[in-house]
Amino acid sequence: MTLVCQKGKAVPKLIRDLFRPASSLRLRLVVQVLSFDLAAKVLLAITAILLIRFMPQSEYARYSFLISVVTLVGQCLSSSFNRIYIVGYNALQLENYPSSLLLFQLLALVVLALAASPFSASEGRLYWFAAVLAIAFCLSDYAKTVYQRDLRFMHFSAVEFTRALLFGAAIGILLFAKPGHRLTAGPVFLAQAFGMIIIALPVAFRALRVSPRASYEGTKTVASALFGGKYKYLFGYFIITSVLLQIDILMLKALRGEADIATYASAFRYYCLILMALSAVHSVLLPMIERLGSASEMLNLLACHRRLCKWFVPIVLIGAWASAFIIPLIDAGRYPGAVLVFRILAISALISFAFSPHVNLLMKWHELQFLFRLNGIGLLGHVVLTLRSEEHTSELQSLRH
């Protein structure tokens, strides 16, 4: 599907319909934003492939585990608070406290890093590199959210694209600088953090340029509203969602060895390619759904999403079939189990894509407790089924021996 619109060339009707509810935005700008977002994710995918190819298995396993921890903490704090920034901007009067959510996240990250440091002996200094990356993730995600809430999607995508470009360039430099073209986890962490911090500095400085007293009062007011009202369910929902995204690799760390962690992490990187379409559309739809003014606009959006599914489903199924040939070419056959894992993840991507607008609509209607309970049931079921499956696998292996 063509995503670039130039000098009056026709844009596919599917794309025109999809963004018709956002009449205040020019179509050409939205299409360009999605193109930049897609380009950023392609850059990240190429960088991920380089990591898979040029990192030793033990280093890649350590890197993947710590990245999962960083992503989990970042999504629990940064992504959840930033979604609340969009959904509850007016209700929480966040225009009066522009730095409150960012300060709360930074303070929470520092406290968590210090509290968990006694348990980080096995990771050594990599733990502190990961802590720096978590702070960088927080700053970068906040910058994206400010632009997203204001419907400044070109700036939003510039953050994503630039940090991906800087990260990829840094990895390229490391590959040429390291003897034997082998990467280690520490420099990769710092390279990733560098790109995130550089691109987030302008927005972060503007948000934090307030008096200490005003920052304290704003943070206290917002924290009280978040944890004392209905938004505590939304916060809990995002925490559970973050845990669900990383629970597999965390359980592999507890139940299996480095080879299984590296295999799953490899498949997960390819799975992120499938999620490009979901992420690109979702980043634009969330603030637009918050601005839906009539039932007809809502029905139009859902109808367009159904048509988009007709494009997405066959592409994902073809990709899942072709993975048996493509993945071994990329990783040189190092992770043969990644094909099956990727195919299972591809099915989950179809489910996520199908229900994405409905979740956003429930947020708009403030059915937050329902979302929280539903996610909690999903997490509990996932853990129970995984543990039961592991017991069954252990029993079969004992019988074979």
Image (cartoon, rainbow, N blue to C red):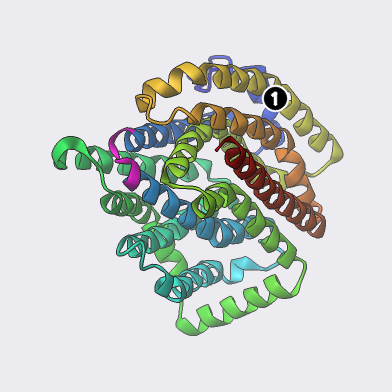
Q: Residue at x 30, y 50 (%)?
A: 185
Q: Quadrant of residue 140?
A: bottom left
> Viewed as shown, does residue 178 lie left or right of 101?
left
Q: Residues within 10 Å of mark 1 (few under 14, many from 20)?
A: some
What range is drawn magenta here?
A: 53-58
Frontmost residue, 240 versus 150: 240
Q: Is residue 88 visible?
A: no
Residue 302 spot, x, y in % from top left = 78, 32
Frontmost residue, 200 versus 245: 245
Q: Looking at the figure, which quarter contains the N terminus?
A: top right
Frontmost residue, 323 versus 217: 323
The residue type indicated by label 1 comes to Cys
Q: Residue at x 51, y 68 (%)?
A: 105
Residue 166 spot, x, y in % from top left = 31, 43
Mark 1, secondary structure of its residue: helix
Residue 354 spot, x, y in % from top left = 72, 33
Q: Residue at x 63, y 73 (%)?
A: 222
